[in-house]
Amino acid sequence: MTTWAQPERRPVAASSFSRAGQVPLRRRPPRGCTPAPRAGFPPPAAARLGHDFGRVRVHTAAGEGGAAARLGRRPAPAGGKRGEAFPGDDIGAAPGSRLKRTDTTGALVGGGIGGALGAVVGGLVGGPVGALIGAGIGGLAGGLIGNAASGPGARAAGTPSLALSNDTYSDNATESRKNVQFDVTIPAGHKATDYALVNWVKGSMKDGSGTYFKAKMYGSVVDANYSSWVVDSVDADPIYWSDASGRWNYRTTPSGFYATDSPGPALSTELGAVYALNFRIGLYKLSDLPATTSGTIGGATAIAERPWQYSVVVDPRTGAFTHPAI
């Protein structure tokens, strides 16, 4: 009979059951105020304008960069078309502004109100100076209103996602392994460290005599026999890859983070052994997860889950490996 307890795998490590660690949005073209006198302007003010604002363009070409900077606006990129939206750039905001082009509602609302306000102020002052002052006030007001209308939720749009890679068996003459990777993608506006993985397990591992192998769960060595879904964790913290140094120990990537698992391996010398384990890897808000577990995580709900298996049967005569579905 072969019995074994697996060492803690951190940070690139094996599961509880392993012998050893492993590792274009478009907008309408810019346009000025209609040259016709507008209702609501006192006649003296309308007469004082003396300018066709229909020909006015604000920060739509590279040569207007200086004025755009003074007004807190961003000019169009070099080579860009007037009035065209530029992916990834800010809308009517100075460099560093957090109002992004994805905030379409706030941008439209802010642009409309800010533009109207700027036109009124510019008309009252009159002349080219009035146009510049009006544009500046309109831009400032539009930015503030646009940010408020968009809100923090729009700036942190999107939901983190979870995927599996390398979910295949790697067999040789002596052992059968699976080095699966859990890939998490974190959208812009979210923090990777606000999310964590929890692995769940159901099933068993037996040697050729039908005796359960041993596994380390929640700090104790137990039979590797799970009739219902329980958290797969070698220590009391349910978070996958947690250890004494901290709860979040994942490997970061440009798009998020990842972790790995390598259950087993089953050995060709374990004649008749059966490894039949179903897993579910889940992505959660870290703040929703309890500090300790004895198999459950309370009411925490997964943002995403992906199933996977470790299924190996060792032929009782030859030691060859097969992988039946379970």
Image (cartoon, rainbow, N blue to C red):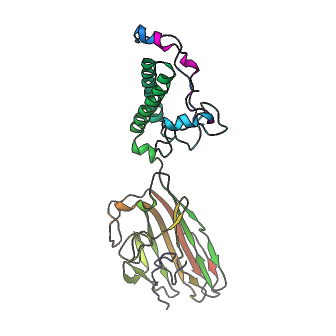
Counting every numbered tag in the picture gives: 0
- Residue drawn 45% across the image and 54% down it: 190
- Residue drawn 46% across the image and 60% down it: 192
Most foreground residue, 62 or 218: 62
Tell me where residue 301 appears, x and y as whole percent. Answer: 38, 58
Residue 109 appears anywhere in the view:
no
- Residue drawn 44% across the image and 43% down it: 154
Q: In this view, does 214 lie to the left or right of 168?
A: left
- Residue drawn 63% across the image and 88% down it: 317
Tell me where residue 169 appears, x and y as whole percent. Answer: 62, 73
Most foreground residue, 184 or 4: 184
Can residue 48 be found in the magenta stretch? yes
Can residue 317 be found in the magenta stretch? no
Tell me where residue 235 appears, x and y as whole percent. Answer: 38, 77
Most foreground residue, 27 or 135: 135
User: In the rendered view, would you say 324 is above or below 122?
Assistant: below
The answer to which image quadrant residue 55 occupies is top right
Tell me where residue 219 appears, x and y as whole percent. Answer: 36, 81
Residue 110 appears anywhere in the view:
yes
Q: Is residue 174 left or right of residue 226?
A: right
The answer to which image quadrant residue 215 occupies is bottom left
In this picture, which residue range is highlighted in magenta? 47-62
